[in-house]
Image (cartoon, rainbow, N blue to C red):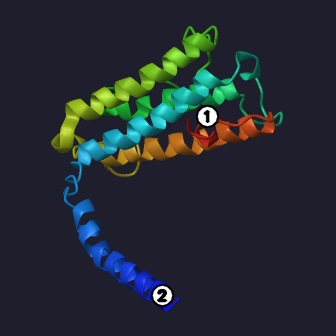
């Protein structure tokens, strides 16, 4: 029994001595550099856009007119609102006035079904991503007058719309749950 205890002690000591060497081996690849400010904005924009597209594509069309209570927007109306509002950033970045009202109507946008709405969501996200790429770090630092009490940097508008989109994505998750469904982001990864 003493031989076994000594053997276990030696194995344990050798294993512990090897741990720092193995840890150093694992750390050979240096960390990637931080993204530029415009790349960071683009990553966040595309991430919330991906979530909005996924939830728009996933929900069955017969649930698009669901709303949790009479005073709420429907799932369709929330998607229209959040997608169209992305142009509040995109249009200012392009030097234009915002093209959409706060709650655009499907008929005004020629959106007749789920496929049309999913296409609209994708276009809104892509147009914003294209504007971020074209502006770059210097351009996103430009100030614009969006009608508020002071000028805003395009960076701030982009982050504001990213936050706004995330808040409404949370609304859409609640709509899923209220219908007894699991939203795409909450499902186990395959």
Question: Residue lying furthest left in this view?
Answer: 138
Q: Residue at x 43, y 46 (%)?
A: 160
- In the image, 28 versus 186, the foreground residue is 28
Judge left or right: residue 8 versus residue 135.
right
Q: Residue at x 63, y 24 (%)?
A: 58
Q: Residue at x 35, y 49 (%)?
A: 156
Q: From what the image shows, is residue 123 above or below residue 27? A: above
What percent of the width, then of the height, locates residue 10? 36, 83
Q: Secondary structure at mark 1?
A: helix
Q: Nearer the viewer, mark 1 or mark 2?
A: 2
Q: Are marks 1 and 2 in contact (CB under 8 Å)?
A: no
The residue wearing badge 1 is 184
What percent of the width, then of the height, locates residue 32? 21, 52
What percent of the width, then of the height, locates residue 178? 79, 38
What percent of the width, then of the height, locates residue 152? 32, 48
Q: From what the image shows, is residue 83 above or below residue 18? A: above
Question: Residue lying furthest bottom in this view?
Answer: 2
- In the image, 27 versus 58, the foreground residue is 27
Crowd tier of the residue under label 1, counting other residues whose Cα lies within 10 Å: few below 14, some 14–19, many 20 or above: some
Residue 99 in view in this figure: no
Crowd tier of the residue under label 2, counting other residues whose Cα lies within 10 Å: few below 14, some 14–19, many 20 or above: few
- When asked about the image quadrant of residue 38, the answer is top left
The residue wearing badge 2 is 5
Q: Residue at x 52, y 39 (%)?
A: 165
């Amino acid at each position: 029994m003493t031989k076994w205890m000594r053997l276990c002690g030696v194995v344990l000591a050798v294993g512990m001595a090897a741990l720092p060497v193995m840890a150093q081996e694992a750390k050979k690849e240096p960390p990637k550099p931080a993204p530029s400010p415009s790349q960071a904005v683009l990553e966040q924009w595309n991430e919330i856009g991906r979530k909005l597209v996924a939830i728009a594509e996933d929900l069955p069309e017969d649930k698009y007119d669901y709303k949790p209570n009479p005073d709420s927007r429907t799932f369709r109306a929330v998607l229209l609102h959040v997608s169209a509002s992305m142009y509040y950033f995109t249009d200012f970045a392009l030097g234009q006035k915002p093209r959409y009202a706060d709650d655009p109507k499907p008929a005004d946008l020629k959106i007749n079904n789920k496929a049309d709405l999913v296409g609209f969501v994708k276009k809104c996200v892509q147009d914003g991503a294209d504007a971020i790429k074209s502006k770059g770090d210097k351009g996103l630092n430009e100030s614009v007058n969006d009608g508020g009490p002071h000028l805003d940097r395009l960076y701030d508008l982009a982050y504001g719309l990213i936050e706004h989109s995330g808040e409404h994505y949370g609304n859409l998750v609640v709509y899923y749950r209220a219908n007894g469904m699991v939203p795409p982001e909450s499902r186990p990864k395959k």
